[in-house]
Amino acid sequence: APNGNNGNLIVRGGFRVHSGGTFIHNNGTVTLITRYGGDTATISIEAGAIKGTFYNLHKLWRKHIKLGSNIEVINNYRNNGSGYLKADGNDIKIGGNWYTRSNKYVTFKGGTGKVIFNGSSAQTIRIPTVAKSFKDFTNVKISNPNVSLINLTKDLNLSGTLTIDLGATLDLNGNDLTAATLVNN
C-alpha cells in the first residue's frame, strides 16, 4: 500500500487477501468507497494469509461492508459513510481510535463478534450524539490501559458482554453505559 505520508489505497469493492497472499499496509490507509457495486462488499483475510492487517481503515458512502474473517486495524477505523460495517460474528482488533460520524444511520452491526481495543497508547471511541450507530454494538473487550469513550450524549447499550482485561481501563468520561454482562478482570 502507499506509505503513511497521506498514502491512500482506494478500493471500490471488496478486499480479500487469499491464503498464502500478502498485504503490507506500509502505514497507509485503505479507503473503501462503497458507492459502487452491489449492496454489500466483503473484507476477508483468509486463513494462511502471510500478512493481512490494516494500518488505517476508512469507509465512505452508503453501501455496506461485511467481514468474511477476523480483521486487525493497527491504527484507526473511521466510518464517514451511511452504510454499516457488519462483523458477521467476526472479531475486529483496533489499535487506535474508533470513529463513526453518522447520526442518522446504523454504521456498525457486531453480531456475535467482538471489537477488541488493544492499543498500546490512549484510544478513543467516538460515537455520534444520537448514538444510533451503536445499537448493535454487541461485545467489546478492552485490553488497553487507557481507552476513553467520548462524544456520547445518549446511553450506550451493549447487548452482549463488556470485558475489561486486567490492567485495562475504560473511562466513560461521565457518559452512561449498559451491558448485558460485565466481566471486569
Image: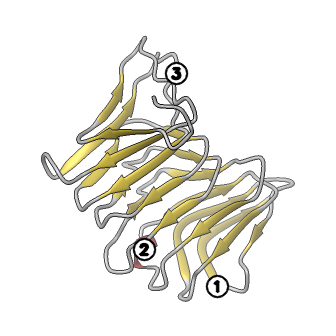
Residue 145: mark: none
User: Which residue in the protein does label 3 denote?
Assistant: 51
- The type of residue carrying mark 3 is Lys
**How far from the left and from the top, in percent, is residue 98?**
55, 60
- The type of residue carrying mark 2 is Lys
Task: Give the answer, above or below, for where 56 lies relative to 79.
Answer: above
Could you say whether the residue bearing mark 2 is in a helix, strand or loop?
A: loop
Crowdedness of circle 2 by 10 Å Cα count: few (<14), some, many (20+)? some
User: Which residue in the protein does label 1 denote?
Assistant: 176
Q: Nearer the viewer, mark 3 or mark 2?
A: 3
Q: Residue at x 55, y 53 (%)?
A: 115
- The type of residue carrying mark 1 is Asp
Residue 155: image quadrant is bottom right
* Residue 86 can be seen, yes or no: no
Query: Do tag 3 and tag 2 residues touch (Cβ < 8 Å)?
Result: no
How far is disc 3 from disc 1 in space, using C-alphas? 38 Å
Q: Residue furthest right?
A: 167
Between 84 and 77, the one nearer to me in the picture: 77
How far is disc 3 from disc 2 in space, using C-alphas? 32 Å
Between 17 and 184, the one nearer to me in the picture: 17
Could you say whether the residue bearing mark 1 is in a helix, strand or loop?
A: loop
Query: Do tag 2 and tag 1 residues touch (Cβ < 8 Å)?
Result: no
User: Which residue in the protein does label 2 denote?
Assistant: 135
- Image-based side of 185 in relation to 45, left or right: right
Could you say whether the residue bearing mark 3 is in a helix, strand or loop?
A: loop
Between 27 and 64, the one nearer to me in the picture: 27
Looking at the rendered image, the quarter that the C terminus falls into is bottom right
Task: Give the answer, above or below, for where 38 lies relative to 80.
Answer: above
Nearer-N-terminus badge (3/2): 3
